[in-house]
Image (cartoon, rainbow, N blue to C red):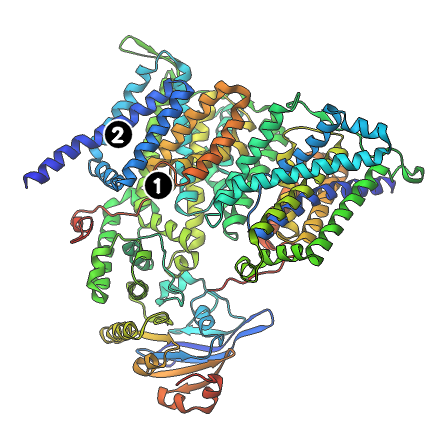
Amino acid sequence: MPVEDGVCLQTQGLSVRFGGLRAVDGVDVTVREGDVLGLIGPNGSGKTTFLNLITGIYRPTAGRVMFRGDDIAGRPPHAIRARGIARTFQSNRLCWKLSLLDNLLLGLYSRQHTAWWDAVLRPSVARREIREGIEKACSLIGEFNPDLVHRCYDPVSSIPLIDRRRVEIARALISEPTMLLLDEPTAGLNPQETIELIDDIARVKESNQNISIIIIEHDMTVIARISHRVVVLNAGRKIAEGPFAEIARNEEVRKAYLGEEM
Amino acid sequence: MSVLLAQIINALLLGCSYSLVAIGFSLFFGVMDIVVFCAGDVGLFGAYVVAGICALTGVYAALVAAGSSWLGVVIVVLIGACLTGLLMVGMYKATIAPFEGKNPLMPLLSTIAAGVALREAIGLFYPEGRNPQVFPELLPRGYLGGNPLLSWRNLVIVVVTLVIVAILYWFVNRTKLGLSIQAVAQNREAAIMIGVNSRVVLLVTFLIGGFVLGTGGFLLGSYYGMIRFDMGAMYGLKGFSAAVVGGLGNIYGAIVGGLLLGFVEVFVSAFIPGGTAYASITAFVIVVLFMLFRPEGVIGERTVENV
Amino acid sequence: MGKRSFERTSGALLAPLIVLALCLVVYMCLRSSPLVVFLAIAALMAGVILLEMTHNLEAVHELIERHGRGTGAVLVLFALVLPFLLRHSSYVMHIALIGCLYAVVALGLNFQIGSAGMVNFAPAAFMGMGAYTSAILSVRFHVSPWIGTVVAIFTAALLGLLIGYPTLKTRGYYLSLVTIALQTIFTLIIINTDWLGGPNGIAGVPPYQVGPVSFGTNLVIGGLELPRQTYYLYLLFLVLGLTAWLAGRLYRSRVGLAWNAIEQDEVVAASQGIDLARMKLLAFSLGAAFAGLAGAIYGHYVSFIGVEDFDFNKSLMLICMVILGGMDNVPGVALGAILLTIVDEKLRDFADYRMLMYGVILVCVLLLRPQGILPKRMRKYRLPGLEWLNHPIGGR
């Protein structure tokens, strides 16, 4: 299939089945460079599964995932991160027993090069990499919340939820990804915190014009505010696509969200 | 042909005793998601209790003199199995319950250690414990209809196993307590919320499991005709392997696994030259292969990890 | 300003003193009766718990790290002097030797259990692989023990890959169980293969030789005759020092961080770009290499190896060393290994009751202090220019 210019990610007929369940069924999505794509749909419609397919956690049973011209479907997660797709998780998956700093440094792993023998044979190179990593981590998290810089060695389980969400986003951003996948970043936050976090995400987009973002959300104010386009999934299939205002008026989308406030 | 048949019967017998230990493992794993590594030694304890009653106390002799030797056997085995059940409950309280909710490595290690301690205690405190003991011949001699392949001993072993499995099936599926055990096994929080007393359920599970293990030990002793204090280690390892192969947590899987392993061992021993040495190795290699390629066992169901 | 330099000098004195005190505790344990050993270990635990309760344990760790040269010097001196102090008891020297050997193996095992969270029940098999490789090469093929030892490192690492590979597809429980099965298979294969010595083992394994000097002989320094273990003891101190240093470096590096991440959450680790298979196999093969090295040295020291030296019970003991010492804590693991070896040897006094007491002690330790002597620490980075990390404004 010919690759169009400016297309960052394109899924073609992407599908996965678990036993008899078609969790994602023939989904075609195109994300251009610099796009912010909102991904919405009722619970169980396959949004997170869709992200898992892109990031290599699940292997598709059919279809392709074209990232900058290469088919990355079925590649392992670490290879996909190395290529420049970073994500956050719906349940805010951090390494709870590690410090805040360590969690951020983990995000940099794919961009570092020292191997196990370097720790022994080239200690100065290894040390320099770590120092640069620490400085980058501190400056990045400081942009989100300056107080966190002083809590570098605190176990990440001890900081409040909104900061934990920020840490997860920072962990994804620290490797300077081409594409950022956010899975319900505002889940569990109160309205005030939601606004703060969306401000953070908007700021991230402003300072990284070329980064593409796919954001899954249930909170429509978030989607309305930052997404350029919206894709709606229901029962694993794409049922609508377009700017948010259009989607909000779409009859089928309303039916899928029966009872949901739009 | 009769050689083949004889070996099939041997395999069946060995498989039965493995199955009973495997059932123990599956019960405990099903209810608490832990592998109770001392199950083999606990089973052997049952065998030692039976042997001890017969050799050291006059109970069995008295029962035989009083009337039916059948009754004597049943009573002695029941005592052995019940005491084993109580031991298992004690083990649970000492080495498993304190680690609830913590790293599952802890109860694994503590049950291994408990197994070692139990083994050594038997060796130390049972008279002449370090030496192999002759196991009393409690099962009737002779053959059914004079057929050399159908010894009463073998028949009783198979029948007892079937009876235990049948009783377990009835208990787990038809009684309230049994269904509570299933509920706790599937989802403990939900079970508590619908009013199941999970503490009682756990205690009962370990009591029953211990009972089954004790019976298994008795059958093992009857099969080999002798017992040694350190047999429990290998017995437990094989029983556990059988449970994994069949599907950990599944009672029918335990039976399938036990029989499968029994067959592999006996057939490799009998029909491959120099095979006795490699019988155990083959069994363990099969277990490793299962754990790699089909960890849910023969009967189990695959679970998909949720992200 | 004055306060800082006072802190620095007092720290420079305090750190080596603490390490010296630990060395003395170990020395005392080596020479004393079982009761004294238990009391000493209890006192050590009490000390550590006291430090923990007053939130000073981390400070002590950092103090010792800051003054690495001083504490290192103390350890080196202690190592050099020890054979002189023990020269009248070759049995006690033997205990010290075996303790160092197991410390090396435990440090390797720590990569798997402590750092990466993969509970491997086959470390004794790795040790055995090294021992048998070197023994067979030197006994049957008359290869120099030194070369045999080097080859042993590689064959053990290979076995590490072999046993590590199945664990890639298994997690948690199943991983442990696979390694139990593999350890058992290893033992069974050796028992049943006569070429490998079978149940009788391999005898006549030659000692190391440097030029005309054989390690099997006594050493005479300054008119004092030191027992034949001295050569091995010095060799082992060197090996232990190197392996501990390597382990420490790995812990501080991005490899150590990756292992910790794998332990916490594999999916997250993979999503950060960590190649799970590669890192797990690295933990296994490096750990196995350590064990193989120790195993080879063991063979050349005791000159007779049998399958009981490398069976499931030994693996169990090694796991206990890592847990007792403190998972993912290099000094903890080394200390735990040495102390547990001493305890194990002292328990021989109880002859028949030894294994029983061992089992009971293990259950008690798991119940009372599962985090070990020196618990897992938060990873800290000590780099020039980043001291502010350790002294956060308004922090503790």
Seen in the picture, residue C144 relative to A41 is either above or below; the reply is above
Label 2 crowd (10 A; few <14 / some 14-19 / many >=20):
some
Residue in the image at 40% along x and 14% along y: C90
Name the front one of labels 1 and 2: 1
Please tell me whether mark 2 sits on a helix, a strand or a loop.
Answer: helix
Please tell me whether mark 1 sits on a helix, a strand or a loop.
Answer: loop
Residue assigned mark 2: C19
Mark 2 residue type:
Val
In the image, is C218 to the left or to the right of C163? left
The front one of A85 and A23 is A23
| Furthest residue toward top | C223
Residue in the image at 24% along x and 30% along y: C18
Mark 1 residue type:
Pro
User: Where is residue C331, by image quadrant?
Assistant: top left
Labels 1 and 2 positioned on one and the same chain: yes
Q: Quadrant of the N terminus of chain C?
A: top left
Seen in the picture, residue C276 relative to B59 is either above or below; the reply is below
Residue in the image at 63% along x and 49% along y: B27
- Tag 1 and tag 2, C-beta contact below 8 Å: no
In the image, is B54 to the left or to the right of B83? right
In the image, is A160 to the left or to the right of B150? left
Residue C366 on image: x %, y % = 45, 38
Residue in the image at 78% along x and 47% along y: B163
